[in-house]
Amino acid sequence: SLCLLLSLSLSICTSPCRQTLMPAWVLDKYGNNNVLRFAKSTLFPIVHYPNEVIIKVHASSLNPIDISMRNGYGAATLNMRRDPLSINPAGSEFPLILGRDVSGVIMESGLDVSFFKPGDKVWAAIPPWKQGTLGEFVVASANEVSHKPKGLSHIQAAALPYVALTAWSALVNTAGLKKDNCKGKRILILGGSGGVGTFTIQLTKAWGAHVTTTCSQDAFSFVKDLGADHAVDYKTPHVEQQLKTLDLFDLILDNVGGDTEKWALSLLRPWSGATYVTLITPLMLNMDRLGVPDGMLRSGVTVGTKVLKHLRNGVHYRWGFFAPSGPSLDEIVALVDEGKIRPVVEQVFSFSEVPEAFQKLEGGHARGKIVIDGI
Ligand code: NDP
């Protein structure tokens, strides 16, 4: 069956795939960092659909979801997406490759792909139900891919796609923010010093907003260098009281969760379309625990109840999610090319140091992104 799959892939590639095995970091089961295994010879990724491309990974980066997925978070839900008819036996997702970001070069493209050709330098964020980017090659749908900014190295480019598309989806698709309606808006970013926060500060400043962010005091100069107008130390007692002394906000992006929801919505300007978007939602956990239909139902009831409760006070409550999108990355390329957005790389690890990179991310206190150099 392997030969059949490989020959199928050959038939839809524009040029013959020569390799059948590649090195990658894989999981054979979920757990702590010890489950990460370097495999010299994993199966070369296969183009299943004519709209797919194979990318040679020149750099990738880590996100909190890689730690969560390594621990088994989302396994039931993602397996449902990988295998909707439950044809495969339990554990068929292994060997699983983590890593969502890629900056690299197109190696093969499916017959329906006209926008990308072998040799093009691209970037993308691969959705979590697909095999990830901690390998030599990765398969992506062409609509998830974009030509990477010319002024960025692969290392720099790999720091942006997943966090940028999460912020873009939350701010633009969910909260309705855009270049033309952002000027002068007061924006509060809860958690500005990590991957999503550092991108959001730059995007909203580039669009003319006034940006306040919470972070540790030692990150004040870091977030201000990125453009934040005001920083508040979340470790001081009663951070919410400090924020309440400021003018009300038009938009809050919550990268922190926990009890922030209890007080953050009172910081919004009521009856003006002001919106709170949180990235910390129970959707995946509910689906893992209760199964996909019941988990979706429970989540729908939870979010619906909260939306109505806050609407009575004149503010909008929303959940935000990462959404893969090549076209959105194209818009971000333009902002990078104009010098309005720069990647924030905290540390670069070599491909052999992937477990150390996970450890670093797990230790917290992110100041931007942890990037993995390609093989
Ligand atoms: P990072 O790990 O890069 O950054 C987290 C940052 O938050 C760190 O700089 C940390 O700094 C800071 N921080 C921690 N606690 C607080 C607090 N109470 N108040 C203010 N800042 C705080 O994470 P990302 O930016 O990549 O992601 C942010 C969150 O969004 C994560 O929880 C992630 O799981 C979630 N997420 C959700 C997505 C979705 O689809 N819903 C997609 C992407 C991300 P320090 O420790 O020094 O305080």
Image: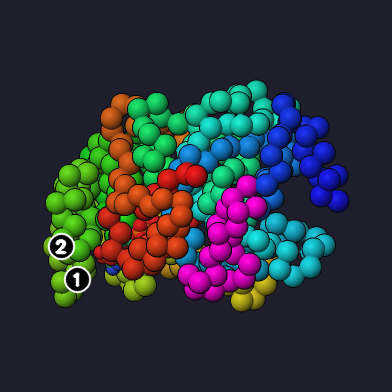
- Would residue 33 be counted in the magenta stretch? yes
Point out residue 301 in the picture as x, y percentages from the top left corner. 56, 69
Identity of the residue drawn at 39% across and 45% down: 159
Q: Amino acid at mark 2?
A: Gln
Crowdedness near tag 2: few (<14), some (14–19) or many (≥20) residues, C-alpha within 10 Å: some
Point out residue 293 in the picture as x, y percentages from the top left corner. 69, 68
**Quadrant assignment for ligand 1:** bottom left
Identity of the residue drawn at 72% across and 26% down: 14
Dominant secondary structure of the residues highlighted in magenta in the image: strand
Q: Amino acid at mark 1?
A: Lys
Q: Nearer the viewer, residue 134 or 337?
A: 134
Q: Is residue 122 above or below residue 236?
A: above
Model colouring: rainbow
Point out residue 275 in the picture as x, y percentages from the top left corner. 37, 54
Q: Residue 253 appears in which quarter of the rendering? A: bottom left
SS for dot 2: helix
Q: Is residue 94 above or below residue 59?
A: below
Left or right: 82, with 247 as reference point: right
Where is mark 2, residue-wise? Answer: 217
For marks 1 and 2 on the same chain, the one whose residue lies earlier in the sequence = 2
Is disc 1 in contact with disc 2, using a CB cutoff of under 8 Å?
A: yes
Crowdedness near tag 1: few (<14), some (14–19) or many (≥20) residues, C-alpha within 10 Å: few
Report whether the residue tagged 2 is closer than 8 Å to ligand 1.
Answer: no
Point out residue 206 in the picture as x, y percentages from the top left corner. 27, 35
Report whether the residue tagged 1 is closer than 8 Å to ligand 1.
Answer: yes
- Would residue 203 be counted in the magenta stretch? no
Q: Which mark is residue 235?
A: 1
Magenta part of the protein: which range? Answer: 22-41
Left or right: 79, with 327 as reference point: right
Residues at marks 1 and 2, CA–CA distance in whole angstroms: 8 Å
Q: Say whether residue 259 is visible.
A: yes
Left or right: 81, with 185 as reference point: right
